[in-house]
Image: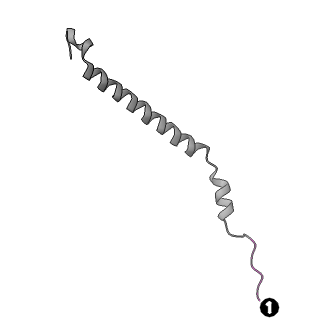
Amino acid sequence: MTGRGCDRDPVAAALRSVWTVGHLVVLGLLAIVADHQLTGDPLSRLTASAPDTEAPEPPA
């Protein structure tokens, strides 16, 4: 909206607030997911599930 009434439009102000809060929530969730992906330690999980590396003894 343009003109003198744009500063007094409560619907536009409410929509702008919802839009801003929504974007902040999405950015926060993306930051949480990125932090979880970057700080996770997959090496410990991989070594825990890896099979034994010793060769089996041949049957006698």
User: Which colour style is shown?
Assistant: one colour
Q: Give the answer, above or below, for where 42 lies relative to 20.
A: below
Q: Nearer the viewer, residue 55 or 36?
A: 36
Q: Position of residue 3 (x, y in %)?
A: 19, 10
Q: Report the side of 13 relative to 42 (left or right).
A: left
Whether residue 57 appears in magenta in the rendering, the answer is: yes
Decide whether the magenta segment is chiefly helix, strand or loop.
loop
What is the secondary structure assignment of the residue under circle 1?
loop
| Dot 1 alpha-carbon crowd within 10 angstroms: few under 14, some 14 to 19, many 20 or more | few
As drawn, the residue found furthest toward the front would be: 10
Q: Please report the bounds of the magenta region as a residue range.
A: 54-60
Indicate whether residue 33 is drawn in magenta: no
Quarter of the image that includes the C terminus:
bottom right
Place residue 56 in its image quadrant. bottom right
Q: With respect to residue 8, does 57 lie above or below? A: below
The residue indicated by pointer 1 is: 60
Image quarter for residue 59? Answer: bottom right
**x and y, in percent, of residue 44 in the image:** 68, 55
Say left or right for 36 vs 24.
right
Q: Residue furthest right?
A: 60
Q: Give percent across and percent down for residue 30.
A: 47, 39
From the viewer's perspective, is 8 left or right of 32? Answer: left
Give whichever of 23, 49 is nearer the camera.
23
Relative to 9, residue 48 above or below: below
Q: State which quarter of the image contains the N terminus.
A: top left
Q: Which one is nearer the viewer's eye here, 50 or 55?
A: 50
Residue reaching furthest to the top: 4
Q: Residue at x 44, y 34 (%)?
A: 25
Give the residue drawn at x 65%, y 58%: 45
